[in-house]
Image (cartoon, rainbow, N blue to C red):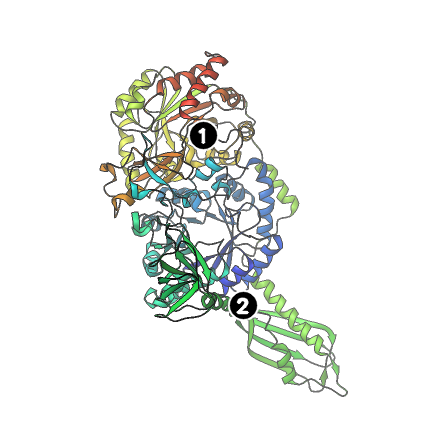
């Protein structure tokens, strides 16, 4: 039997899902309010529902965590803190947070409110966990891709609680690093509005000529992951150091929550060896896109991706054996029941569904009304089981959780009646306003008292022992007894539902805290019109005019010392670029490289909080906060300044108005991206591994398929992808180019506009010249417009979110 102290954490998207989770054995639930939640399409909870949810859960010894896991705009901060004050007052147990600025404000406003770092914070290594622990977080939800050895390293070296996903849908991109839905459709995953472009079909192309590279891999779901299922590996996960085992699915129906929670509860209580084949099939049947044990447990390539279809595939149930003018005949490989949903594979590879009107047994042949485009031999899947749904609903439609109480009743003539409820080591005593009388015709009996005080069906209690002291001849109305029982239960409930025993914060005190935390050093920008450039390849560096830039970010290591010295000879700032995802081995390798050049560089650009902590711990260098930190508000800048950052690349999801607001508040060096193919996804998954049928990522560095390929979407748009090391980056189809808007950004308080060269080989010199000359006022408006038109006609461009934003 496994340690029951490990927390089974269930997803809740509605009150019915809450009942399903709690009644089936969840130790804690996570849910979102109507505001500021990363699942904006879920039903979510209004204020009264939140209060009811906390009370319902707490009375059953279940904790409640509320998600506020999106990036927050400056204009929203006061409103979200008022919302969090409400959550604090109704005794929510913890907040799941993505935005570092929000965490900074919560820590300073509600010092005893538990902070959990959302997986959207992209924490995947020990230094990241240390950063969050020092910042005030009590728990981190690790990136889903974090391997076991990294989890064990974090467990052994920190006291922060570790939470990990064990079941449900997976994001193919590292959470918090996905811009695809935002950039191509305006729906930001960082704002809870992801349109799931990863579930769309793509074709692998030769990026240089745009032609289909592999005939079989046309219109496949190359970015769609299978669903995570670790039911048979639960001991391994727990032994790694995960203390909170998280099920994904806030948008799933309550029956899904009930079924999945029940089976993981069984695995936790009795061990995965007690999970039966029937249990496994129930979990498969309730919803699956195919199952993977995840990158954490070394699945990769075809064992990880659901490339044939992106949706629920149900359970194989039979095959079409005959078709006539009216009917389709199906030979069953499973029992089916009236009300079950089935899907049949069409001749086009899609699926058409129907609902069965009769039950039948395995081995029988059933007939259904004819459906077009179905052929003999078509596979048939049961996508929903009516019996499973009914069983799941029955599991939470009654209250299965009851706690024993001991009761003492004292009734004496001429005195108020007194009830004492004993629970654990606590006594709760109430007495009646009614003075007990001497009965004239009717008197109370012990049986009558027991009967009235045992009416606890609408509570979470049952009487274990009852001790009655009843003076003979006593009388009081039955309604008074019932009222006494209700008052006693309420007193007990009030005590038990208040898990955290927090002190009230008056509105005046709250307002004072806000006033103190909303203070900024009003900043007049002194340094303007700078140009910075980042390059990933030595060949790109060699094409640069080092006279025409102010800062350079170097992301390659070939002949790096000579490249740095060339830039320093021109008296330019030099920073080393770091990848968004670095594990322990990567960090140690990077440390060795920095050691060789630390005396000739100015600093390091970090895109991950773990890298930030690692550089602070190992070097005395300037630190630049790069795009991967998702800096979206002034409060995040305050938090990062406190950690020693001197310059920041603002989030590419900000618009001009937001940038102006941020830059007016706090003294730091502001940078925005002015040119570049924005990285839309950073993935451990490699689409090319599907072609090669790679079993792991051990040969990525020598793979011939690592570059030169792209994905074409269903609209014919091409996206370049490249494997660097063990990670694939998918880039936008067209570059961001705001050449004609540079002055507006400078006027809005931006110090530096950055040119990001990623996979480009041609045109680098001209792009640099145009941006540099514009920043120095050396090019006319007409020349700028002419260049932009010529460039747009050849390559296409986007202005990103500068004129739209994501709010």
The number of numbered discs placed on residues in the rendered structure image is 2
Residue 300 visible from this viewpoint:
no
Query: Is disc 1 placed on a helix, strand or loop?
Result: strand
Residue 20 left/right relative to 509: left
Residue 306 left/right relative to 486: left
* Rendered image: mark on residue 261: none
- The percent position of residue 286, horizontal first and vertical second, equals 43, 61
Quarter of the rendering occupied by the C terminus: top right
Give the foreground label among 1 and 2. Answer: 2
Instruction: Answer few, some or many: residues within 10 Å of disc 2's Cα (few below 14, many 20 plus, some between 14 and 19).
Output: few
Disc 1 from disc 2: Cα separation: 52 Å
Q: Nearer the viewer, residue 368 or 544?
A: 368
- The percent position of residue 374, horizontal first and vertical second, equals 39, 56
Q: Earlier in the sequence, mark 1 or mark 2?
A: 2
Q: Is residue 618 above or below residue 761?
A: below
Q: Nearer the viewer, residue 607 or 762?
A: 762
* Rendered image: mark on residue 648: 1
Residue 568 visible from this viewpoint:
yes
Query: Is disc 2 placed on a helix, strand or loop?
Result: loop
In percent of the image, x 43 and y 38: which residue is there? 180
- The percent position of residue 498, horizontal first and vertical second, equals 57, 59
Residue projecting furthest to the bottom: 441
Residue projecting furthest to the front: 325
Residue 618 left/right relative to 188: left
- The percent position of residue 685, horizontal first and vertical second, equals 33, 44
What residue is pinned by disc 2? 397
Q: Nearer the viewer, residue 529 or 259?
A: 259
Quarter of the rendering occupied by the N terminus: bottom left
Instruction: Answer few, some or many: residues within 10 Å of disc 1's Cα (few below 14, many 20 plus, some between 14 and 19).
Output: many
Res 238 → quadrant: bottom left
Q: Nearer the viewer, residue 121 or 94?
A: 121
Q: Is residue 362 above or below residue 517?
A: below
């Amino acid at each position: 039997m496994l340690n029951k102290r490990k927390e089974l954490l269930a997803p809740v998207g509605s009150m019915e899902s809450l009942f399903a989770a709690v009644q089936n054995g969840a130790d804690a639930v996570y849910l979102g309010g109507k505001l500021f939640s990363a699942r904006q399409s879920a039903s979510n909870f209004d204020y009264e529902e939140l209060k009811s949810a906390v009370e319902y859960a707490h009375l059953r010894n279940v904790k409640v965590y509320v998600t506020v896991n999106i990036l927050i705009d400056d204009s929203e901060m006061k409103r979200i803190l008022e919302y969090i004050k409400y959550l604090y007052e109704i005794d929510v147990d913890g907040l799941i947070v993505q935005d570092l600025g929000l965490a900074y404000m919560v820590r300073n406003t509600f010092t005893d409110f538990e902070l959990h770092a959302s997986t959207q914070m992209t924490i995947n290594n020990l230094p990241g966990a240390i950063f969050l622990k020092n910042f005030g977080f009590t728990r981190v939800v690790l990136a889903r891709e974090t391997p076991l050895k990294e989890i064990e390293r974090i467990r052994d070296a920190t006291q922060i609680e570790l939470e990990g996903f064990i079941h449900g849908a997976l994001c193919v991109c590292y959470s918090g690093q996905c811009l695809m839905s935002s950039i191509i459709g305006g729906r930001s995953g960082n704002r809870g509005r992801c349109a799931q472009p990863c579930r769309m079909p793509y074709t692998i192309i030769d990026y240089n000529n745009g032609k289909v590279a592999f005939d079989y891999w046309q219109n496949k779901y190359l970015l769609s992951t299978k669903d995570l299922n670790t039911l048979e590996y639960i001991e391994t996960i727990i032994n790694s150091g995960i203390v909170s085992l998280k099920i994904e699915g806030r948008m799933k129906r309550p029956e899904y929550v009930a079924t999945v929670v029940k089976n993981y509860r069984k695995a936790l209580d009795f061990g995965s060896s007690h999970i039966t084949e029937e249990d496994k099939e129930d979990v498969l049947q309730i919803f699956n896109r195919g199952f993977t044990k995840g990158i954490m447990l070394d699945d990769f390539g075809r064992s990880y991706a659901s490339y044939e279809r992106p949706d629920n595939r149900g359970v194989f149930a039979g095959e079409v054996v005959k078709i006539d003018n009216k009917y389709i005949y199906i030979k069953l490989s499973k029992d089916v029941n009236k009300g079950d949903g089935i899907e049949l594979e069409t001749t086009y590879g899609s699926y058409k569904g129907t609902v069965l009107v009769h039950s039948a047994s395995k081995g029988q042949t059933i007939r259904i009304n004819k459906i077009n485009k179905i052929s003999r031999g078509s596979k048939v899947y049961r996508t929903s089981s009516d019996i499973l749904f009914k069983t799941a609903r029955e599991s939470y439609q009654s209250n299965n959780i009851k706690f024993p109480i001991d009761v003492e009743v004292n009734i004496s003539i001429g005195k108020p009646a007194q009830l004492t409820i004993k629970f654990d080591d606590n006594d709760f005593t109430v007495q009646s306003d009614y003075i007990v009388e001497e009965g004239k015709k009717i008197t109370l009996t012990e049986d009558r008292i027991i009967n009235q005080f045992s009416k606890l069906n609408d509570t979470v209690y049952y009487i274990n022992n009852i001790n009655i002291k009843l003076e003979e001849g006593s009388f009081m109305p039955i309604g008074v007894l019932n009222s006494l029982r209700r008052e006693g239960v309420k007193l007990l409930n009030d005590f038990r539902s208040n898990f955290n025993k927090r002190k009230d914060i008056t509105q005046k005190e709250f307002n004072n805290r806000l006033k103190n935390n909303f203070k900024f050093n009003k900043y007049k920008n002194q340094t303007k019109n700078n140009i910075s450039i980042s390059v990933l390849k030595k060949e790109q560096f060699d094409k640069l005019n080092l006279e025409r830039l102010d800062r350079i970010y170097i992301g390659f290591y070939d002949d790096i010392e000579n490249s740095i010295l060339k830039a320093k000879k021109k008296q330019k700032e030099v920073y080393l670029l770091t990848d968004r995802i670095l594990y322990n081995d990567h960090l140690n390798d990077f440390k060795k490289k920095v050691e060789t050049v630390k005396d000739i560089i100015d600093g390091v650009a970090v895109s991950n909080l773990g890298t930030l902590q690692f550089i602070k711990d190992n070097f005395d260098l300037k630190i630049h906060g790069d795009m991967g930190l998702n800096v979206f508000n002034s409060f995040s800048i305050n938090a990062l300044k406190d950690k020693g950052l001197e310059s920041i690349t603002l989030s590419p999801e900000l618009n001009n108005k937001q940038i102006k607001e941020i830059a007016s508040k706090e003294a730091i060096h502001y940078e925005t991206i002015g040119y570049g193919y924005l990285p839309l996804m950073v993935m451990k998954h490699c689409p090319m591994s599907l072609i090669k049928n790679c079993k792991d990522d051990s040969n990525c560095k020598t793979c011939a398929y690592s570059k030169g390929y792209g994905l074409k979407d269903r609209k014919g748009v091409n996206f370049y992808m490249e494997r660097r090391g063990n990670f694939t980056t998918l880039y936008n189809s067209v570059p961001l180019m705001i050449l004609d808007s540079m002055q507006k950004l400078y006027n809005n308080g931006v110090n530096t506009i950055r040119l990001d060269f990623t996979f480009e080989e041609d045109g680098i010199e001209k792009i640099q010249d145009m941006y540099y000359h514009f920043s120095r006022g050396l090019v006319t408006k007409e020349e700028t417009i002419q260049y932009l038109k010529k460039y747009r006609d050849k390559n296409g461009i986007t202005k990103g979110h500068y004129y739209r934003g994501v709010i």
